[in-house]
Image (tube, rainbow, N blue to C red):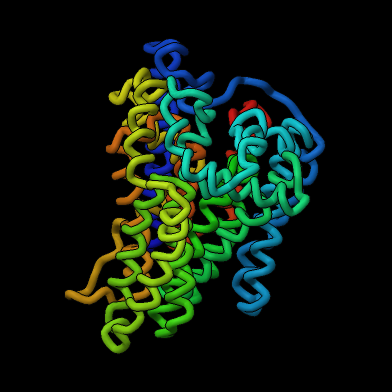
Amino acid sequence: MTRLRSVPRDLYAAAAAALLVAAAGLVGRYLFTYDDLIVGWPPLLGRWDPHLGPGTPAAVLVAVATVAYGPAVAARLPWRALLPAAWGAAMAWTWSLALIDGWQRGIAGRLTTHQEYLSVIGRWNDIPATLRDFTQHILLHSPDNWPAHVAGHPPAATLTFVLLDRLGLRGGGWAGAWCITIGATACVAVLVAVRALAGERLARRAAPFLVLAPAAVWMGTSADGYFAAVAAWAVALLALAVTRRSLWWAAGSGLLFGLTCYLSYGLTLFAVPGAAVLLLGRREVRKRPLLFVPLLAGTAVVPVAFGVAGFDWWEAYHLLVTRYYEGAGGVRPYGYWVWANLACTVLITGLATAAGLRRTALVRRHGEEVRTEDSRLAFLIAASLLALLVADLSGMSKAETERIWLPFALWLLPACAFLTRPRAWLTAQAVLALLLNHLLATGW
């Protein structure tokens, strides 16, 4: 009876989330101008553009199949088979959504015309020299200043696409395929972490929601999907390290945490979920404290390599803050975006996640230890939500968080494991993603 009584309350949470989105849209449209917010369809960067595309039939088919069979398949498939199945389904969902806009507009042109990484590859003929001079071109009025997204990220982001080009994988098509293929593995990473920390039952319940996430609308159209996967695997390997007391997993986690910080400045906040993993695994860590040695050594590899090459992370970050306020960041009103950003989060995580977060908040801890599987998952979700809220309050993410916050949003989706009636909630997730991709021309 308690679960049945909870269903209307879940609907109230979803309705409150929908009202937040509506309020952000109405306030953004009628109380502000485009020159205030610099987005075409507040709170999202995009414009109204109802359309169909070659990916439409596939997207509908993937959605229907996942809603109809996803929960049962996730419950029964052997674990080792479930992970590649989830990866494949997540790729199918992301590819089909991206192709609703066609090959050029949906995939090949995104990282050249919108995020600009490929447009500067010609300036990286001498990689060491470019790294040494990288900070000299961050400020908006500096000579040959970097485009916004190149300047707005540490050089590992652009360097990834430079190396793909060197390998012969040139152009937006290969870059888009890279981001979708790697980005879809984030689903697997979250499942691995949830199973290690909170048990297989909850991981299996979360799997269809990770596959059919509305976030896939942006995972397939921006490099942030790739960043999200790297950050997710850093957390997942850390979870494996502490639960299996493995020095190798610890070293791998550290290496990816270091890379994460050199893909996006804001992803340093993944220290919060990382700390949550260590806290959840503190008993195992006490039994093998040497785990910290490879973890810290691995974390140092990427920063040391870039430092030796001449790139100063701290200098670049401070210059970026200056550039941020020279551009759109200095125009967009903090008082609007500090809550409208959360409306963007609703759109990338879906109404099911809002209902799941309500249930997450009701999970209780028992004594001083986080003992039950439900409590352990709730703790990990809460840590991820805390990192997102810190990013929000910082003021360095005013708008475009449907893309920027993808790495954090993925860790809120496991809250859906607490929901009853998964097929109904999966339907809501799928409908939201399909409407967003068919009614809007998203900016990313």
Q: Residue at x 65, y 46 (%)?
A: 162
Q: Is 216 displayed left or right of 328 in the figure? A: right
The answer to whether residue 165 of the structure is visible from this angle is: yes
The answer to whether residue 194 of the structure is visible from this angle is: no
Where residue 148 appears, as percent x and y from the top left, is 50, 29
Q: Is 412 displayed left or right of 71 in the figure? A: left
> Furthest-bottom residue in view?
287
Where residue 1 appears, as percent x and y from the top left, is 38, 63
Q: Is 314 displayed left or right of 37 in the figure? A: left
Whether 131 is drawn above or below 204: the answer is above
Q: Nearer the viewer, residue 153 or 229?
A: 153
Q: Nearer the viewer, residue 188 or 58?
A: 188
Q: Residue at x 66, y 75 (%)?
A: 77
> Furthest-left residue in view?
368
Q: Nearer the viewer, residue 301 or 209?
A: 301
Q: Residue at x 44, y 40 (%)?
A: 345
Whether 78 is drawn above or below 85: the answer is below
